[in-house]
Amino acid sequence: MIPLAVPDLSGNESRYLQECIDTSFVSSVGPFVDRFEQMVAKSTGSTGAVATSSGTTALHLALVTVGVVPGDLVILPSLTFIASANAISHAGASPWLFDVNSESWTLDPGQLETQLALETEFIDGQLTHKSSNRRISAIMPVYTLGLSADMDRIYNIAKTYRIPIVADAAAAIGAKYRDRPIGGLNASMSVLSFNGNKTATSGSGGAIISNDESLLAHAKHLSTTARCGADYSHDQIGYNYRMSNIEAAIGCAQLERIDSLVSAKQKIDKTYREAFCTLRDIEFFPSPDWARSSNWFSGFVLGPTYSDASNFCQRLNDLNIGARPFWKPVHLQSPYVTSVIENMEVTDNLWRHIVTLPCSTGLTKEEQEIVINAVHEVSNQQ
Ligand SMILES: Cc1ncc(COP(=O)(O)O)c(C=O)c1O
């Protein structure tokens, strides 16, 4: 089977892991964690970073840090991995689910602007959702497939309504928005995942990036049980969310090669686009002129002459190609069906038709050729 996305661990990963064992720094204190944070900040163009045990814990921590409290609503596009919604729930809040636009598959700024005007009002200085009487305390745009949301437009809306942005940039390391890297955008905090299927991995792991030193300091404090000094004093209810030195060791080795890992992803995507431009009734993943995707995942959307993506992927799996459908949206997941849900026209029409194809950074030319031939074969049988 040619897998969907597996890490390339051919750099300094094993040497750095051995160093952790030789020095006994295997837990959340150790030189690789600090080095990893510096490398994340540098590669995303942000002032600083806080390394965490996963992208999900980073999202939870970022939400708490910007002031989300139990009972609040957090604006979220439904087309995302369920972890984005779960992080909101872990903070005791609930997602207010929005559609994406077809231009980018990211949070639709038009719908956001319209619905905020229609459905909210300021009560005692708090932005409040009128029908549920709940405070709205953050917007979480998601950088779908590694493509940033339209952050200037979303920021202008967020500024008008005085709500902070926590961007879920889980898979967007290496992405650009209007020539700016993801750490240079207008989110209060942005979150990356370094899970094993990401462009760069630390095994499991995540990071919060920000240009606000005090938010970063607060997040770091909360991630280490809010401990004050060397004795067992803690000034808040904190979390045990810090990345371990072992994870950071792998992460550092990966980030040393981040430019080549991102360009491998972008090259794979380009090759698929060239190979499939004659394929009937498919569309490629969005590529608006204001953004450059990190191309975390590559693939296409099946048009109406095909049945859904599961069927197409199954036929590819039968040919030993690790193709997969994409995220089932949050508003259709049982824990979230009773959320506040906006019109989902784009998401509903899209999600069942997305096919993702093998795109490991170590995918060879020969392997990609096999995938391309298999896709042509399956398409011709439809
Ligand atoms: C959009 C999105 N958000 C959050 C996460 C959660 O990250 P992690 O698996 O590191 O907890 C992922 C992971 O795939 C993701 O794709």
Image (cartoon, rainbow, N blue to C red):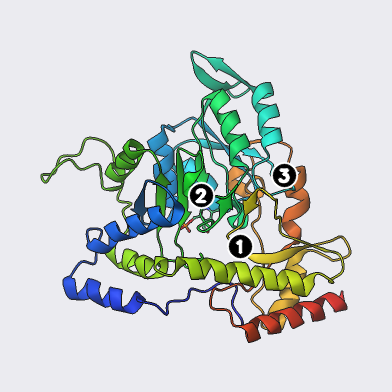
Q: Does the residue labelled 1 lie within 8 Å of ligand 1?
A: no
Q: Which residue lies furthest to the top in this view?
A: 124
- Where disc 3 sits, the SS reads loop
Tell me the quarter of the picture where residue 300 sits. Answer: bottom right
Work out how far the residue at label 3 is from the one at label 1, CA to CA, in angstroms. Answer: 18 Å
The quarter of the picture where the C terminus appears is bottom right
Tag 3: amino acid: Asn
* Residue 9 seen in the current view: yes
Q: Residue furthest left?
A: 231
Q: Is residue 310 above or below residue 28?
A: below
Q: Do the residues labelled 3 and 2 touch (CB within 8 Å)?
A: no
Residue 81, horizontal then vertical, whole percent: 57, 54
| Crowding at mark 2 (Cα within 10 Å: few <14, some 14-19, many 20+) | many
Tell me the quarter of the picture where residue 37 sits. Answer: bottom left
Q: Could you say which disc has been placed on residue 182 in the image?
A: 2
Q: Could you say which disc has been placed on residue 356 in the image?
A: none
Q: In this view, does 217 lie above or below 381?
A: above
Q: Residue furthest right?
A: 305
User: Reading the chain from its start, which is encountered first: label 3 or label 2?
Assistant: 3
Q: In this view, does 205 lie above or below 86?
A: below
In-front residue for pair 289/253: 289
Q: Is residue 228 above or below residue 251?
A: above
Tag 2: amino acid: Ile
Location of mark 3 (residue):
101
- Where disc 1 sits, the SS reads loop
Q: Could you say which disc has been placed on residue 295 in the image?
A: 1
Work out how far the residue at label 2 is from the one at label 1, CA to CA, in angstroms. Answer: 14 Å
Tag 1: amino acid: Asn
Residue 196, horizontal then vertical, whole percent: 47, 68
